[in-house]
C-alpha cells in the first residue's frame, strides 16, 4: 500500500513538472486535473481523449509514454535520435531515404556525399562505428553555405533544414530559390538576412525536399503532408506489425509543417485499405473538431485512399523487421507516387496524442502485449 501510494505521488509529481514546463493546455478545474494525474494523464489528454466512451486504462497514458516507452529501444535510441546516424542506417534502403547534402555548423557548410550508403552502428554511446566500411572522410570540403546554395539550387528548387536531433516540427525549416532570391519558411530574405539566419542554425542538416504525391498535394498544398506509421516488433512471431497509422494534413495555422499540435489535422489510416477517416483538429478551443473535408481547401479527407497503400505498408514492415533491434518506431513517410515513399524521419518514442485522438491503443491485445513485454503497462 505504501509503495503504491509512493508510485502514485511520484507519477503526479512528474506530470505536474511536465505541465509546468509546457503550461497546462486547457483551463480545467483542479479536481479534474488531479483526476487525470491519478490515471497518468496530462490535462490536455482529458480533452483530446474520449474518456466517456473508453476507460482510461485502455489508453497509453502520458506517464507511460514519457517515462517508460523511451526505454523500449534501450541504448539503440541513439541510432534514431541522431538524424544523420539514422540516415546512414537507412543506407540499406537507399530508395526510401532523402539525400542529405551537408551540415550547417559554425557558420560553415560541411559537405557530405548524398549517395553515401555506409552502414552505421552504435552501442548507444557517443561513438559511432561504420560496419565493414572506413570512417567518413573528415577532409570533406567546407564552404560558405550561401555560395553552395547559389551554385547548386536552380529556380524553384527547395531544401529542408532540420536540426540533427529532436522532432515535433519546431526545428524544421524550408529554403526555396525563386526568381534569383531566397524564401525562408515562405518569407523572402535578402542575402544578408539569410546569412545571419544560417549562422544561427547550428548542427542543422541540409536535406533533399521530397515532392509529395498529387493526392497529398490536393489535401493541402502549402505543407508536405506526412503519414505517421507506428511499428512494433513482435518477438513471438518474429515480425513487425502496425498497431495504428495516421495521415497528417497541414493548415494555414501549421505552415510550414503539418504537425497536429501546431494546427494540422490528423486522419486515421485504415490499415487494410489505406482509406482516411475524418480529420481531427487539435482542440485549442477545448473541443476536438472533426472534418470530412479540409476546412480551407475543401478537399475530401474521409474516404480518400493512399495510392498503393498495401505496397507501402508491406515494404515498411519489411524495413521494420530488418531493424528488429529497434522494436518501437514511429516512421514519418512522404508518399511520392502510387506504392512509393520516402522516410523523412523516425522517432524512438513517438508521441501518441495524434494517434489516440482516434482510438485508444491498448484495446488491441497484440499491442497491449507488446507494451506489457517491454514493461510499459
Image (spheres, rainbow, N blue to C red):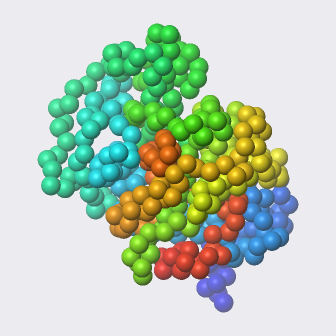
Residue 100 visible in rendering: yes
Residue 377 visible in rendering: no
Residue 293 vertical position relative to residue 76 in the rendered view, above or below: above
Q: What percent of the width, then of the height, locates residue 140? A: 20, 31
Q: What percent of the width, then of the height, locates residue 121? A: 26, 57
Residue at 42% from the left image edge and 82% from the top image edge: 236
Quadrant of the frame with the N terminus: bottom right
Residue at 29% from the left image edge and 35% from the top image edge: 114
Quarter of the figure with residue 105: top left
Q: Nearer the viewer, residue 66 or 177?
A: 177
Residue 52 vertical position relative to residue 305 in the rendered view, above or below: below
Quadrant of the frame with the C terminus: bottom right
Quarter of the figure with residue 17: bottom right
Q: What percent of the width, then of the height, locates residue 24? A: 74, 53
Q: Is residue 216 left or right of residue 24?
A: left
Quarter of the figure with residue 295: top right
Residue at 22% from the left image edge and 26% from the top image edge: 141
Residue at 34% from the left image edge and 19% from the top image edge: 152
Q: What percent of the width, then of the height, locates residue 356? A: 67, 62
Q: Is residue 232 left or right of residue 294?
A: left
- In this rendering, the count of numbered labels is 0
Q: Is residue 348 left or right of residue 113?
A: right
Amino acid at each position: 500500500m505504501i509503495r503504491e501510494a509512493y508510485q502514485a505521488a511520484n507519477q503526479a509529481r512528474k506530470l505536474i513538472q511536465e505541465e509546468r514546463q509546457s503550461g497546462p493546455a486547457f483551463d480545467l478545474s483542479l479536481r479534474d486535473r488531479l483526476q487525470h494525474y491519478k490515471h497518468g494523464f496530462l490535462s490536455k489528454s482529458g480533452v483530446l481523449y474520449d474518456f466517456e466512451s473508453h476507460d482510461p486504462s485502455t489508453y497509453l497514458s502520458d506517464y507511460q509514454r514519457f517515462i517508460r516507452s523511451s526505454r523500449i529501444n534501450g541504448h539503440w535510441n541513439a541510432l534514431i535520435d541522431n538524424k544523420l546516424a539514422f540516415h546512414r542506417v537507412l543506407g540499406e534502403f537507399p530508395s526510401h531515404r532523402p539525400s542529405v547534402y551537408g551540415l550547417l555548423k559554425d557558420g560553415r557548410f560541411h559537405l557530405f556525399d548524398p549517395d553515401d550508403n555506409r552502414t552505421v552502428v552504435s552501442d548507444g554511446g557517443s561513438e559511432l562505428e561504420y560496419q565493414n566500411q572506413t570512417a567518413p572522410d573528415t577532409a570533406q570540403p567546407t564552404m560558405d553555405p550561401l555560395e553552395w546554395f547559389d551554385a547548386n539550387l536552380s529556380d524553384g528548387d527547395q531544401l529542408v533544414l532540420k536540426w540533427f536531433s529532436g522532432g515535433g516540427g519546431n526545428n524544421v525549416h524550408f529554403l526555396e530559390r525563386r526568381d534569383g532570391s531566397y524564401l525562408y519558411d515562405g518569407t523572402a530574405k535578402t542575402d544578408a538576412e539569410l546569412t545571419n539566419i544560417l549562422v544561427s542554425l547550428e548542427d542543422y542538416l541540409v536535406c533533399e525536399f521530397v515532392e509529395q504525391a498529387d493526392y497529398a498535394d490536393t489535401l493541402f498544398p502549402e505543407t508536405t503532408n506526412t503519414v505517421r506509421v507506428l511499428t512494433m516488433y513482435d518477438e513471438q512471431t518474429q515480425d513487425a506489425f502496425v498497431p495504428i497509422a495516421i495521415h497528417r494534413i497541414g493548415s494555414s495555422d501549421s505552415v510550414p509543417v503539418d504537425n497536429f499540435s501546431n494546427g494540422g489535422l490528423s486522419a486515421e489510416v485504415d490499415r487494410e485499405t489505406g482509406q482516411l477517416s475524418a480529420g481531427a483538429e487539435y482542440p485549442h478551443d477545448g473541443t476536438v473538431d472533426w472534418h470530412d473535408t479540409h476546412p480551407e481547401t475543401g478537399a475530401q479527407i474521409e474516404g480518400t485512399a493512399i495510392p498503393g497503400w498495401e505496397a507501402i505498408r508491406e515494404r515498411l514492415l519489411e524495413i521494420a523487421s530488418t531493424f528488429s533491434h529497434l522494436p518501437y518506431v514511429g516512421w514519418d513517410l512522404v508518399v511520392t507516387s502510387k506504392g512509393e515513399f520516402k522516410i523523412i524521419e523516425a522517432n524512438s518514442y513517438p508521441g501518441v496524442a495524434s494517434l489516440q485522438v482516434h482510438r485508444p491503443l491498448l484495446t488491441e491485445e497484440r499491442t497491449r502485449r507488446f507494451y506489457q513485454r517491454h514493461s510499459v503497462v
